[in-house]
Image (tube, rainbow, N blue to C red):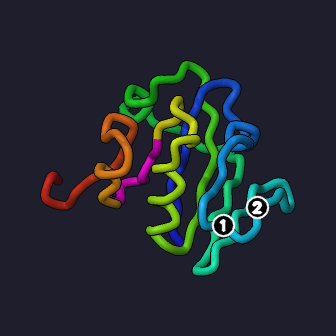
Amino acid sequence: MQYVILVGGRNFSLKSFDNMQFYGSTCVGIYDGDLLVQYENGYARFTPDDDIAYIEEESAKIPFAEPKCITLRYNDIGILRSIISEKDFPEDVVIDCDGVYLGLEDVIDSGRLINNYNISEV
C-alpha cells in the first residue's frame, strides 16, 4: 500500500470529492468514515487525518493558514495518476508525496507537489 497526503484549506473534507467521476471505478462509497473507490485492478481510500503535523520548514510550502489533510492510500500508481489528473480533482489541493518521488509532474502542476524528492536532487 502506498499513500500521499492531500492538503487543503479550512473547508477541505471528503465532500471536496463529491463532484468527481472516478473514471474506471467499479464502486464508490463511504465506509467507516473513509471514501473508498474500487477499481478492477485495485482501490483508493481517502481518510481524513487531522493529526498530521508539519515542521516549520514544511509548513512554509503549504499555502493554507489552517490546513486540513486527507491521506489517500492506493495500491497502484496508475490509480493515483488517474485520480489526480481528473478534471474534477479539487484545484485548491496540494499533494504531499512524503519524500517519495512519484513522477507526477506530467499529470499535475509540479507547483502543487510538496516533499516530492527525486534522489538525483538530494
* Residue 65 colored in magenta in the image: no
The magenta-colored residue range is 95-101
Residue wearing tag 2: 28
Q: Amino acid at mark 1?
A: Ser
- The dominant secondary structure in magenta is loop
Asked which secondary structure carries label 2, the reply is: strand
Quarter holding the N terminus is bottom right
Residue wearing tag 1: 25
User: Relative to the observer, which residue lies in front, 82 or 30?
Assistant: 82
User: Relative to the observer, which residue lies in front, 113 or 121?
Assistant: 113
Q: Amino acid at mark 2?
A: Val
User: Relative to the observer, which residue lies in front, 22 or 30?
Assistant: 22
Provide residue 71's location: percent of width, then percent of height: 61, 53
Q: Is residue 46 above or below residue 9?
A: below
* Residue 96 colored in magenta in the image: yes
For the residues labelled 1 and 2, say whether their Cβ atoms are less than 8 Å apart.
Answer: yes
Taking the spot 62% from the left edge, 41% from the top edge, the residue there is 69
Asked which secondary structure carries label 1, the reply is: strand
Provide residue 13's location: percent of width, then percent of height: 72, 38
List the single residue furthest toward the right.
32
